[in-house]
Every structure is written in structure tokens, then in C-alpha cells.
Image: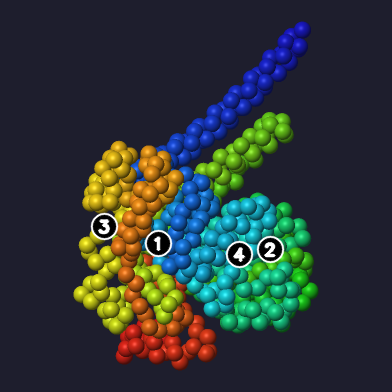
Amino acid sequence: MEEIKAAKQRLKFYRDQLELDYQLEIRALEEAESRVLKRIESFDAKKKETADANGRSDATKDELLEINAGGNIIFARRSVLTQIEGSRLGAIFSGRWDNRLQRDNKGRIFLDVNATCFQAIVDYLNDRNISPPDHPPDPPSVDVENEEILARLLEIFGIHDIIMESQSKVTIDRNDWMVIRNWLKQEKSNGIMKLVYSSTLNGCSLATFQEKCRSIGPNIIIAKDAEGNIFGGYTSCSWWQTHADKAFLFALRGNYVVSPLKFDLKAGRQSHINTSSGPSFGSTGQYVNTDLRFNLNNSTFLFCIGANYEVPLMTNPFFTNGTYRNYSQLEVYEVLPSRGRADEKLFVFPQTALKITKFTPPINEAIQSRWQAMYNVDASQSNLEISFANEEEMIASFAAGENKDTVLLSLSGTDIAVKRSTLQFCEESTLARQFDDKIWKNQTGGKHTPIFKWTAKEVISWIDRNDDIDDEVVQRFRENVLKGAELLALGKEGLADLGIKRKGTIYLIINEIKKLEAKHESPVTFIEHSPYCFGKIVDYLRLKSAFCNGLISVDPPRPTVRQSEKQRFRRIVDYYFPGDSSKFIFG
């Protein structure tokens, strides 16, 4: 009996210990989840506080927004424009900054952007909004001449990386991209990543690789093998050079990769070489000195780290066995040089949950899954907080402004809209002086408050001055406390809802509102030059302004002009940028 009693006590001890371990594990998990929840609640409170001070905390996702994009009027739902969480585009249209956003004379949100490129982005977002996550739409596209403008605009809006992710056929997720971004930032090599070669899209061919990659500088290769391992390498110079200042190899995930690994170049070693079969990370094309080598003639690779790159702490046959294996996909991204970005902080990516082994396998898996979910939410929240910290600076430098500084231009009959500060960006130019306060009469003439900003008192004052409108109608307006934006929105049904029943009076008021709008219509500055050529100048000024404000990482290239327009473009530039100031455009 003593033996049975001892066995029972021993069983009870281990059962109680197991129960205690479980309670402690769950308590630690719940405390961690509670801390994340409090951060989220605090963050939501900050966003509401910002909205109350600068915009609208009651903005709805279904609201249809009217946007003046460089002179083109575009309608889009707020939910479509804000679907990419943490992006600058989402911040602009979140509602938090509505009272700070620049408007045109009709109260529409004004963006100083290339209208064609912005329309392409909205079209993409509309498609993305109805596409399943595993079948994203094709990236936004424009004609070749506007591709550079579109790429920079995507960066301004903070959605370039999201679209780049949808292009990748290696199927890495956003956390992987954030890891790569962090590594590049650590190497001071952060910039726009541009897909230049894909074995899936361009075919697995050494000749195609050389054609696509011959002229690129810093670049990163990402590959995937048949077992799902994702790996590659970075070099800070062309494949037709052999000594990069900075280079590293990496493995993101797969059967042999528990967490992302980065292998740095050893001091004084040669980083890479372009061999007769494809790119090779190492000092020569010889087997013994190659750390990672790709053979594009037969879609194979070998890993044998140690000659030129630091060996990982743990011995892993995937990185050291030196035998050729097949890769299924390979992509090369050019990393355009950066002078620094407004969002220079490192991304936060989720830590990996520790393996739980104390309990039964199903319980271990469930607890570990819950820890990982918490880490994922925590990292996502951290990245949202990083983005939010930069919002006000971005709004001030790109989207804020006075409606009187929205300039309407008629380019020989083609209308565009642009910020006056954009036209004045090159201070020594004739163009800048044309729009200086001393010469250019701004669009409001300094006399009128825009109708959409009228108070209810100003609306009553206007309608009361109209002798053809009787006192009963004026009283209806006074009772309903209509403001300027509401006045502009009135139609036949709206006037009837106010209690105005006589059709003659309704049509009279509508006509008076139209006359009022015409009187307050912003004057148009006529530009007697080619819309194509002058538009190229405006687009270049927009990008230069964005670069100087830290919204894009790469100084924009000179305008691309088709051959038939080059002489005309030169004459127009010389007219608006005489003498040495033309170097601003031509270099």
C-alpha cells in the first residue's frame, strides 16, 4: 500500500506541476496580449486626438471623395484610398488631416501630381479592393515616358514596396521584405527596389540576365529552390565589377532556416564575380572560392559559405555542402541609391515564438500559435506607430496648403492644376518670377473667402442681399444654419427638404448659386506653349520638390522627351529658364 500511496503522490505532484506550468504560461501570454492591447488603445486615442485637432474623427470608409489631381477630377471611396494600412496615401485620406489638406476653389482635395499616374494608382487600388489576397492585380502601369514619374509617385504615397511585393514570383511575404529592408538600411544602402530580371517572367537564360542586368548598380538577388528555401545575396555595385564596398548573403526561410540569417562579407575579401554561367558571390569562379554560385544555363545553384563570407554559427548542410541543386525561381532587384528617406527608422518584424514542449502536442502547438499571433500583432502595431510618427511632416510638405495657392493653368487649351510653390521651385527662373506675389495676382485676388469655407452667417448675408428672394426663404436658410459647402451641394430635392415648395423659387435659388460660383471661379493663367513640353517641366518640378522634402529617396532623372518634341522642349526651357538657370532642367 505504501508503494501505491507514493505513486499517487508522485502522480499528483507532476499533475499539479503541469497545471502550474500551464497557468504560468497562459498568465504570461495574457499579460503580453494585454500590453499589446493597451498600446493599440493608446494609439487609437492618439489618432482620434489628431483627427479632432486637424480633421474629422467621424470620417466614414464609404464616403465618396472628390479629388483634384493635377487638374483632373477623380472620384474614389475613402475605403479604397486607405486600404493599405500604414501608407502615406492612407494617412492623407484617413480623415485625420482633412482640415489641413490643400483644396481647390470648390473645396475639393487638391494633389499636385501627374493626373495620368494618379489615375493609374486609383485604378490599381480599385482592382486590389476586389481581388483575393492570393491573386493580386497587376501593378499600375503607364506609358514608358511616365514610368519614372509613376514609380516616384508610388514612393511618395508609401505604396511602392506593397506593389513590388505583388510583382514577385518568389512568393515571399511582407515580413521577409521588411527583413531585407532592414538589412539594406543597416548597410546604408536603402532605396527604391526595382525588379529588373525574373526567371519566371523573362525566362531562365544567361543572355537575358546579362541584357537586363548589365547597366544596373547595387542589386539584390532573391532565389527559391524546390524545397521552399528562400535565399540570395546583395552587392553594392554592378556585376561587371568585382569589388563591392558592401555585400552580404542571406537566407530568409525554408526547411533549413528557422529565422532569417545574414552572412557578412569578410574584411578584405572579393565580394562577387560574373562568371560564364551566371552571378557568383565569391572571389573567383572556382569552386573552392565560391560562397554562392548560380548557373543560369541549367537553373542550378550551390552554397558553400566560408571562403569570403562569414560562416553561420551553426553548421548547416544547406549552406556548406557545396553540391549543385536546382532553383525554381530567381529575381534580381536594382537598389537605386538613396540620400535618405523621411521614414528612416528600421521596420519591426515579428520575433519567432519559442518552441513549447511542456504539454501534449496539440496544446503545445496551440499555445505556440497564440504566442506567434501576439508577436505578429505587436510588430504590426510597432510599424503603424513608426508610420504615424512621420505623418504630420509628410502632410505639411506634400498635401497641406492654402486653396489660393492652387494655380489653374491652360496650356493652349489643356487645363492642369499645380501648386504655386512648385512653379516657384527654381527661384532664379523666369517661371518662378511669373508667379511671384509682386507679379502674379493670386487666384482669389485676396478679396473673397472661398464659398466652401463660408460660415452660416455669410450664407445668410448673401441670400439676404438678393432682392428677388423673399424673407420666408431667407428664414428657412436661417433656421437650417447652412454653411458654404452645404450651399454648394443644394439641388432641387435639397431645397424642397428645406421647406421651399414653389418651383419658381427653387429654380431661382439654383440659378443664383450658379452665378455665385461663376463669380468666385478661379482665374486661369494662360500658357501659350505645348501642353506636352510644359507638362514635362511641371512634372520634373514636382519630383524635385518631393526629393528636397525627403518624400522620395532618389534625385529624379532629367525629363524624358520624345524625339519629335526635343527642339520645342529646348526652346520652352530656355524661355522659362534663361542662361545658367537652364542647367536646372538639363544639368
Give the amino acid type for the residue marked by disc 4 in the picture: Pro
Quarter of the image where the C terminus is located = bottom left
Residue 379 or residue 17, whichever sits in front: 379
| Rendering quarter of residue 257 | bottom right
| Rendering quarter of residue 270 | bottom right
Q: Which mark is residue 198?
A: none
Q: Position of residue 325 (x, y in %)?
A: 77, 66
Mark nearest the camera among 1 and 2 is 1
Which residue occupies 65% across, 54% down? 131
Mark nearest the camera among 2 and 3 is 3
Mark 1 Cα within 10 Å, few/some/many (few <14, many 20+)? many
Query: Which residue is label 3 attached to?
Result: 449
Mark 2 Cα within 10 Å, few/some/many (few <14, many 20+)? some
Q: Position of residue 404 (x, y in %)?
A: 29, 64
Taking 14 as reference, is 319 above or below it? below
First in residue order: circle 3 vs circle 4: 4
First in residue order: circle 1 vs circle 3: 1
Mark nearest the camera among 4 and 2 is 4
Quarter of the image where the N terminus is located = top right
Query: Which residue is label 2 attached to?
Result: 169
